[in-house]
Image (cartoon, helix red, strand yellow):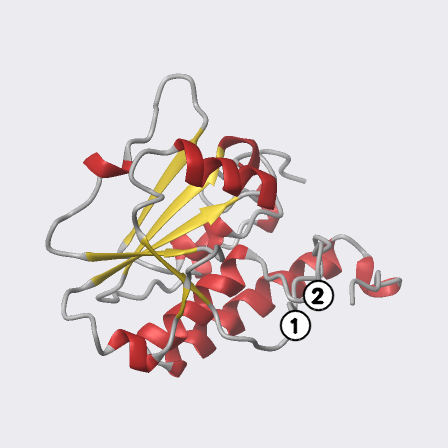
Amino acid sequence: MNDSRCSRCGMLGDDCFCQNVTSLDLSTQLVTLMHYRERNISSNTARWANLFLQNSIFYAHGQADFQIDFNKLQDPSRKYLLLYPKPGSIELSPTFLQSISSPISLVVLDGSWRQTRRMVRRIPGLASLCSVTLPSGNPSQYKIRRQTSPDHLSTFEAIARALGIIEGTDIQKFLEEKFDEIIEKEVVLRGWHKNMPNFE
C-alpha cells in the first residue's frame, strides 16, 4: 500500500484519482481561500473542485509566511462574487446575473463556519465584495464528514451549485457526478459500505 499523500487531491497514493480528472475550461474563475488548518485533511473537498476547473486559483489563509490581501489580488476587468451567507447577501439567480456584464470570479471560503467568519473580517478586501447565497436545494450528499446543519453543503457541492446557476445545469451535473464517484470510492475504501453511518 502506498502511504504517501498526493499533493493535489490530498488522498493517499492508492486512493489518488488525479489521473482520471477531466478539467473544465469555464469563463467563470474560481478563487478558493482555504483556512490553513484544512490543508492536511484528506476529506477536504475544496481542493477537489479546483482539480476539475482549469480557471481556478487557490490560496491558503493563516500561513505565517503569506498574508492574503484580496485588494491586491483582484482583476479590475472581472466581477467578484463572494459565496457567503451574511446579512445583505443576494440570492444567486439568473435574474441577478443579468445585471453583471463582466466575467465573474466566484470567491469561495473553505473552513468551518467560525473560521470563515474570521476570514471575512480579517482578510482585507473580502468584506467589500458583493456577497451571494445559494437558493434552497437538496440536502448534502457528502457522506464522509458530518454536516453541522441539514441545509449545509460541502465546499465542492456549493461550488457545483453556484456554477450551475452561472454556467449552466450541465456543468453542475458534471461536477456532482464526479463528486459522487469520489465519495462512493472513499466509502468503499474506508469499509463504510458495510456499516454506513447515518449522516442525515
Does residue 12 appear to the left or right of 36 in the view shown? right
For mark 1, give the secondary structure: loop
At x 64% / y 62%, what residue is drawn? 183
Name the residue at 43% across, 75% down: 172
Q: Toward the viewer: 51 or 150?
A: 150
Which residue is nearer to you in this view: 1 or 92?
A: 92
Q: Residue, x 59% and y 62% (percent of image)?
A: 153
Q: Quadrant of residue 163?
A: bottom left
Q: Vertical placement of 174 versus 187: above or below? A: below
Q: Position of residue 160 (x, y in %)?
A: 45, 68
In this view, the residue in front, 88 or 62, is 88
Relative to residue 133, is residue 149 drawn left or right?
A: right
Kindly check if marks 2 and 1 are in contact, taking CB atoms under 8 A apart as contact: yes
Mark 1 burial class by Cα count in 10 Å: few <14, some 14-19, many 20+:
some
Whether residue 12 can be seen here: no
SS under mark 2: loop
Q: Nearer the viewer, residue 86 or 167?
A: 86
Q: Which mark is residue 139?
A: 1
Residue 71 % position (x, y): 22, 37
Q: CA distance from mark 2 to mark 1?
A: 6 Å
What percent of the width, then of the height, locates residue 70? Answer: 28, 38
Answer few, some or many: residues within 10 Å of disc 2's Cα (few below 14, many 20 plus, some between 14 and 19): few
- Quadrant where the image shows the C terminus: bottom right
- Furthest-front residue in this view: 88
Q: Position of residue 105 (x, y in %)?
A: 26, 57
User: Does residue 186 appear in the picture of this structure?
Assistant: yes
Q: Which residue is mark 2?
A: 150
Q: Label 1 amino acid?
A: Pro
